[in-house]
Amino acid sequence: MAFVRKKKINGRYYYYVVTSTRNEGKIRKVERYVGINPPTDKDIQKYADKFNSTKGFLSSKELDFEKIKKDYLSKLGGGKKDELTNIEEEILVKFTYDTNRIEGSSLTYKDTKMLLQEGITPKEKPLIDVKETENHKKAFLYMKSNLNKDISKRFILELHGILKKDIAEDAGMFRNGQVFVGDLVPIRPSMIEAEVSNLISWYKKNKKIPPFELATIFHCVFERLHPFFDGNGRVGRLLLNFILLKNDYPVIIVQNKNKRRYYNALRRADNENYLYMIKYLFSELMNQKYWK
């Protein structure tokens, strides 16, 4: 059964659909943020149906998730120092290459590896692509060094500030103008502060739902808010992995070669349908061998 709950934050009402599920013999409630307009009965039923579909998929993959975490933690605990260092470097290079390539970087994987591991700047490549690659490495390492903390507005702005340092004047600042992303019209700039705070509040309140689902929904909503003029995808993918790493999952690399499937899943998530993104990220995780 699903019902609507509304909350008043800074004078504005925000609406949630609340569904109930049983976990380890206990009934728990899961909230889904649905916006500033009250949902209709049809909307409520739609959210309930999607919740049940997502729950079914996650339940069917429960043993896979357990094995992933077990194998990953075993590798971290049993690997030799040199081996683990090599794995970390491989993840950093691959993550940086793919996340920047998705956003249009001209650097090849070889360029990225030589730049990040040997400090060799690729010839005849735009300096902005080189700088964004170097900055992403710093942002990735900063994200990993703060796993003992939690997501906050300050942390999000810090990641953006590192990513866009010496590139954009608005590094570390939310956008102050309207943007358009294909057919999606993100929220007005006057709403960004409140909506980001609302997302963080939702995240902190719903940590009892499966971490993979929590991370996926957070990522999708963050991308829908599109709080920056540029860097939303890269910051969003860092935050996705921040949540996963905090819950003992390995890093998920959204591969450039699969970006059409990734973007398709994001568009479906704009309508609160997160199952496609969950399935996509699960497939990426299962196909990435470094944690095995």
Image (cartoon, rainbow, N blue to C red):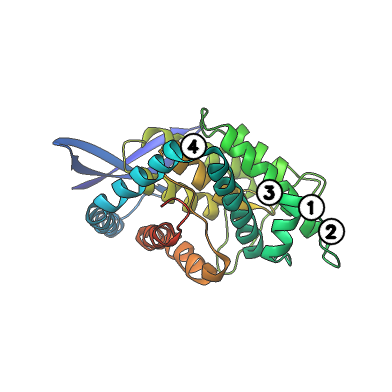
Q: Are marks 2 and 3 in contact (CB under 8 Å)?
A: no
**Few, some or many C-alpha atoms within 10 Å of disc 4 (few <14, some 14-19, many ≥20)?**
some
The reply to whether the C-beta atoms of the residues labelled 4 and 1 are less than 8 Å apart is no
**Residue under pointer 3:** 136
Q: Is residue 166 left or right of residue 73?
A: right
Look at mark 2 in the image and give the residue it sits on: 127
Residue at the spot of label 4: 200
Frontmost residue, 24 versus 22: 24
- Kind of residue at badge 2: Leu
Q: Quadrant of residue 143?
A: top right
| Pointer 1 residue | 131
Q: Image point 79% across, 50% down: which residue?
A: 119
Q: In x, y percent, where is residue 127?
A: 84, 58
Residues at circles 2 and 4 in contact by the CB criterion of under 8 Å: no
Residue 116: x and y, percent?
72, 51
- The CA distance from mark 1 to mark 2 is 6 Å
Say whether residue 67 is visible. Answer: yes
Judge left or right: residue 112 versus residue 99: right
> Could you tell me which secondary element the residue under label 3 belongs to?
helix
Indicate the secondary structure of the residue bearing disc 2. Answer: helix
Residue 218 lies, in percent from the top left, at 46, 47
When the figure is inspected, residue 147 is found, relative to residue 60, above or below; the finding is above
Labels 1 & 2 near each other (Cβ < 8 A)? yes
Q: Looking at the image, which residue sits at the far left?
A: 25
Q: Tell me if label 3 and label 4 are in contact, CB under 8 Å.
A: no
Image point 42% across, 58% down: which residue?
A: 281
Q: CA distance from mark 2 to mark 3?
A: 14 Å
Q: Position of residue 125 (x, y in %)?
A: 82, 65
Pointer 3 local density, CA inside 10 Å: few below 14, some 14–19, many at least 20 = many
Q: Amino acid at mark 1?
A: Lys
Q: Nearer the viewer, residue 123 or 60?
A: 123
Specify the amino acid type for callout 4. Ile
